[in-house]
Image (cartoon, rainbow, N blue to C red):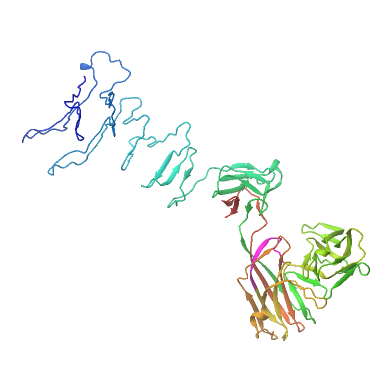
Amino acid sequence: MQMPVEATSNNWGANSRAIATKFKFFTNGNASISVDTGVAGEFEVASADNKGNWIADDAIAGRFVVDLGSDLAHTTASAYSLYAVSHVKNANITITNSYGLYVEAMTVAGTNHAIFTNAGLVEFNDALTVDGSQDIVQATIQAHSTQTANVFEQQQSDTTVVLSTNNDGDVDHQENAILNFGQIAMKSAVEATISSGAITITEGHIRVDTEADAANDDLDTINSTQSGEILFLLPANDARTVRIRHGVGNIFLKHQVESKSFSFSSPAGSSGTFYAGGYYNWTSTNAGLNETSPTSVTHSAANSPSACHIGIVAGGAGVVDTGVIKLTVTGTTIDDDGNRSASQTVDLVADITTLSLNDYVETSEKFIGQVTITLATVSGSPVNFNLDFNYGCSKYEDFGNQAFSVTVLETVGLAGANDTGFNLRLFYHSIAGWTYAATGFVPGGTVLANMNTDYSTEQDLSNGESFAYKRVNLNQDVAGDSGEGVVLEITTSANKAVEIMDIHFGVHTAPNFAYLATTTQHLIFMKHGSNWLEL
């Protein structure tokens, strides 16, 4: 049945309404009607008296469509196939629940849909509540087969996205906090095998295995894409050890508080300059080497277990008439793994003319026994050449070849004699702060702490009395992995001035290595930029 609307004018008013069919349930006058439900209109598809066969692809009780198939040009702001307006009542009527659309339970089909929409946006301008009546998934968002946009977004009133989920299930909190969660349960760790010192990860819980199942392997680099990631690492096998190396690639181990302690007693019947945490064994006068005599100089006693770095402090640039002259050190080297190599010659200065006054240079190798420091020809045929320098060997505390920041020096002792010449100085051993002297040379670079400077007048030892010296917040970065360290100088002017003294160095350090050796062990890292920082 079609009920056309016929216009009596070619131009309706702006507020006019064209109504094809209107259903209205109403009371006339002052009549009073009592019913359970008032229905203005009802649509039903049914077979009469349940007789006959009903055959149809779809049964539709009511179909609503806006058909604007006019030949006249026109603009329609909005087209509504079904439009529910707010209910109308007077002040004497109370409505407990008001529904714009109410759908009773759909139960008769194999699959029951109370509301089903095809393509087109679905928008709710107020709260949406899902009150499940069955033990099924209560809310499902199924992405499109080619989905690239976010599958879900939570937005503020100005459309700012504050939470989103992509097609891979990644949840982006848009830099917002996650509050009051109970716990995080991660899936079991997946394995990543080291290849040339690196692993590539796609998850946050990783079992690291050595390359080709080697007994030991180094991990230097972790490859991933997302900055800010949290990563849990454990070894894949108790029989294989993974060594994580600090700063070799993009992995940086966390700083730790460490300390070293030493004790000191003045040698019987002796006074002078002593050291703790290392030592300086330097000559007090310079060496003046030239083309005739001497061309070399020796240092340290034969067969002495000195294990020190050989160094010089230049008295200025070397002089060479032509060609290139270098300065070498010959002797027996020893490394920190206990490897001894006899008759080794290393270049200390490649070209003596490049030196300047007070330049400090030392060997990266450690030498034991006597060494020989020599001027040697590199190129050309030099006839006249010379170099003046102080020389000696240095041993210093580097906390196992680690970079560190020295923060604390503390000493506590007991005087064994009266001494007005007592002093303590903490040296930062580096290439800076050295001073050449032809005679009366004093080894040592930058002074971090000086008891006599701090105490001024109250610096004398009294026989039998205790003494102490403490400095905090020294905060000096020391490249212990690159030829730097700290040394405490102890000066006495009376025999047996120090009966006993305890010495403590306190530092913050990042260890060179961390070891994954047992599957009960975890290390945690966070990616910052391109680097992984241990937490």
The magenta stretch is: 397-409
Q: Quadrant of residue 69?
A: top left
Residue at screen point 30% across, 25% down = 108
- Residue 234 position within the rendered picture, expressed as x and y whole percent measured from the top left: 61, 48
In percent of width and height, residue 295 lies at 91, 67
Placement of 51 over or under 388, stated as above or below = above
- Please state the horizontal and vertical placement of residue 220, each as a whole percent of the image: 66, 49
Residue drawn at point x = 89 percent, y = 62 percent? 322
Q: Is residue 356 left or right of residue 85?
A: right
Residue 247: horizontal and vertical position, in percent?
A: 66, 54
Q: Nearer the viewer, residue 193 or 25?
A: 25
Question: Does the magenta portion include 81?
Answer: no
From this view, report whether residue 495 is shown above or below residue 377: below
Above or below, 416 against 509 in this view is below
Give the image quarter of residue 314. Answer: bottom right
**Quarter in which the C terminus is drawn:** bottom right
